[in-house]
Image: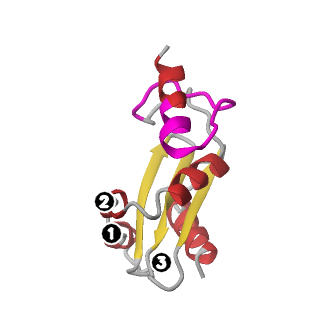
Amino acid sequence: EGNQIIKSLIKEKLGVDVEKSIIADGSGLSFYNRIKPRFLYEILRKNYSDKDFIASMPQINYINKALNEDVLPPYVKAKTGTLLGFRCLCGYDTRENNPKAFVAMASGFEPLSKNINKDVATLASQIIK
């Protein structure tokens, strides 16, 4: 039932139909969730005009600091998602004259790559160039 409530809210409030997704819980931290990067992108794109939503996203400095190098530019605001064998980085290029939403995902990689966080961040950086 919670799955359907979340899907209905996303459709009602954001106009994004995620009916084909599986949302096992609302936290996003579940191996059972299945959502396409395209749906995440649409949610981000439709929220670009919501300045409070964007302000709630962290600055990218903490990711660059964790990677020990500046992979992403300072005008990026993004959220990470991490589970065993899965990495996601999605957010915004916040330059006023060129706003872009982006989603970079990697899943099913084996063996577990110690560089996957950097690889996903590098992919995101290439998307927003």
Dividing the picture into quadrants, the one containing residue 104 is bottom right
Which of the two labelled residues, at mark 2 and mark 1, occupies the earlier sequence position? Answer: 2
The answer for how far apart the CA atoms under marks 3 and 2 are is: 26 Å
The answer, for residue 120, to whether it is visible in the render is: yes
As helix, strand or loop, the secondary structure at mark 3 comes to: loop
Residue 23, relative to residue 46: is it above or below? above
> Counting other residues with Cα less than 10 Å from the Cα at mark 3, is it few (<14), some (14-19), or many (20 or more)?
many
- Direction bottom: furthest residue: 97
Disc on the earlier residue, 1 or 3? 1
- At a point 53% along the width and 56% down the height, the residue shown is 46
Which residue sits at x=61%, y=27%? 22
Q: Label 1 sits on what residue type?
A: Gln
Q: Is residue 84 above or below residue 109?
A: above
Q: Is residue 91 on the magenta stretch?
A: no
Give the Cα distance between marks 1 and 3.
Answer: 13 Å
Q: Residues within 10 Å of mark 1 (few under 14, many from 20)?
A: some
Q: Which residue was labeled with disc 2?
A: 52
Q: Main secondary structure of the magenta part?
A: loop
The Cα atoms of the two marked residues, 2 and 1, are separated by 14 Å
Give the label on residue 11, or none.
Answer: none
Whole-percent x, y for residue 86 in the image: 56, 45
| Quarter occupied by the C terminus | bottom right
Q: Disc 1 designates what residue?
A: 59
Type of amino acid under label 2: Asp
- Residue type, numbered disc 3: Val
The answer to if 26 sits in the magenta stretch is: yes
Query: What residue sits 35% from the left and 56% below the top?
Result: 53
**Residue receiving disc 3:** 71
Q: Is residue 68 above or below residue 110?
A: below
Stretch of the chain drawn in magenta? 9-27
Res 119 quadrant in image? bottom right
Secondary-structure class at tag 2? helix
